[in-house]
Image (cartoon, helix red, strand yellow):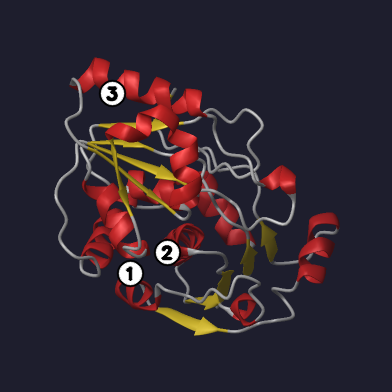
Amino acid sequence: MRTVKIQGGLGNQLFGLAFARSVALLGGKPVALDLAGYRTDRYGRGFDLAKLASTLFAASLSRRPWLSSRLVTAVARRLPLPGYVSETRPPHDGGDLARLIEKGLYFNGYWQDERYVADPVGFVAATRSFVLARAPRSPLRDVVIHFRSYKEEIRSSARGTPGPDYLRRALERIEATQGRPADIALVSDDPALAREWVGDIGRHVTFINGSGPFADMALLMSARALILTNSSFSWWGGFCGEAALITYPERDRLFHYPAPAARFVIV
């Protein structure tokens, strides 16, 4: 049996689950999801996608605290351990992904690139159904902005977010492509910081407060246009969404930066 470590919040869990499904599809063997890291998660998070996992493939849940420990992770990055695969450069194609999977028994990484996702159409369809079933109905918005603050990060270097100029460029791109939006909504883990970030543009924005992660992601999935930030949550809202235009920031000096999907527009 192959095992994939699952870690982080909802967005990172989706990346891990998408990769685990790729391991199941291309590896032809049962796959376990290692949830041991949630016993000591410093933010108190838990695994939110057990039901989705069970609908996607024959996944079992396990806890392997030794293999998922920081010590083993650090050692594995320096010394090759047989069957232990850490996140590496994304595969070039499906064959390259299959060869990566064939090498491993235990997979530890964040897998934040669409090239790690086999059969993305099937995964997106199941994820949309899962998220929308857990969210109240909301009005269709012309534009939805997602702002991730990273306020909880211990290291100041890891708190970077795109500047307000990115927001202005994104809105200009949307207006040039789709016309002036009549309705703009914003979701964030910290609405107060988000108000500071948008500045004067905020007078045209509806701030959505306290809706919960599934409601927020459903809003992203249903928008006509999206302005995403450097967040795995943002990324999946765009990847699984129906927006005709999805803007994404440049890498610049941002620490957290899931690789943009092919249909995202860098502005």
| Distance (Cα) linking label 3 and label 2 | 34 Å
Counting residues from the N terminus, which is met first, the one under dot 3 or under dot 2? 2
Residue 117 higher or lower than 14, as above or below: above
Amino acid type, residue under disc 1 in the picture? Leu
The quarter of the picture where residue 171 lies is top left
Q: Which residue is drawn at 57% across and 38% down?
A: 161
Q: Is mark 2 on a helix, strand or loop?
A: helix
Residue bearing mark 1 = 56
| Label 1 close to label 2 by CB (< 8 Å) | yes
Q: Nearer the viewer, mark 3 or mark 1?
A: 3
Counting residues from the N terminus, which is met first, the one under dot 1 or under dot 2? 2
Residue bearing mark 2 = 21
For the residue carrying disc 2, how many other residues have a C-alpha within 10 Å: few (<14), some (14-19), or many (20+)?
A: many
Q: Residue at x 58, y 60 (%)?
A: 102
Q: Residue at x 60, y 53 (%)?
A: 151
Residue bearing mark 3 = 174
